[in-house]
């Protein structure tokens, strides 16, 4: 989620990262949602870099909450 490029797998049934080294099962809808979410995270980080005084807990509350929820999630299938 936080590194490498997200690309649809060659079979269209998942997501590949690190040049195909990692493969995750995911529907097209999940893939599109991850792309949008990652774009929001990138925008927030760029804003923080441009303005170090930016309070990301206030300005990006929804994005930060989603990241925290993902990191704490135990509903991940391997």
Image: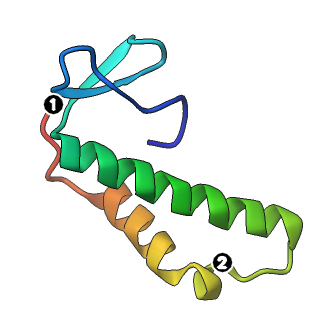
User: Residue 17 is drawn in which quadrant?
Assistant: top left
Element assignment for label 1 = loop
Q: Seen in the image, is 38 located left or right of residue 21?
A: right
Q: Seen in the image, is 41 located left or right of residue 46?
A: left
Element assignment for label 2 = helix
Quarter occupied by the C terminus:
top left
- 36 or 49, nearer to the observer: 36
User: Residue 31 is drawn in which quadrant?
Assistant: top left
- 15 or 72, nearer to the observer: 15
Horizontal and vertical percent position of residue 63: 48, 71
Q: Residue at x 26, y 14 (%)?
A: 10
Q: Residue at x 61, y 88 (%)?
A: 58
Neighbor class of circle 1 (other Cα within 10 Å; few <14, some 14-19, many 20+) is few
Quarter occupied by the N terminus:
top left
Name the residue tied to disc 2: 56
Name the residue tied to disc 1: 78
Q: Residue at x 20, y 49 (%)?
A: 29
Q: Is residue 73 above or below residue 9?
A: below
Q: How is the image coloured?
A: rainbow
């Amino acid at each position: 989620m936080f590194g490498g490029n997200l690309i649809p797998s060659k079979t269209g049934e998942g997501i590949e990262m690190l040049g195909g080294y990692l493969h995750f099962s995911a529907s097209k809808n999940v893939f599109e949602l991850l792309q949008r979410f990652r774009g929001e995270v990138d925008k927030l980080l760029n804003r923080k870099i441009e303005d170090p005084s930016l309070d990301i807990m206030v300005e990006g509350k929804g994005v930060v909450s989603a990241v925290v929820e993902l990191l704490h999630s135990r509903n991940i299938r391997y």
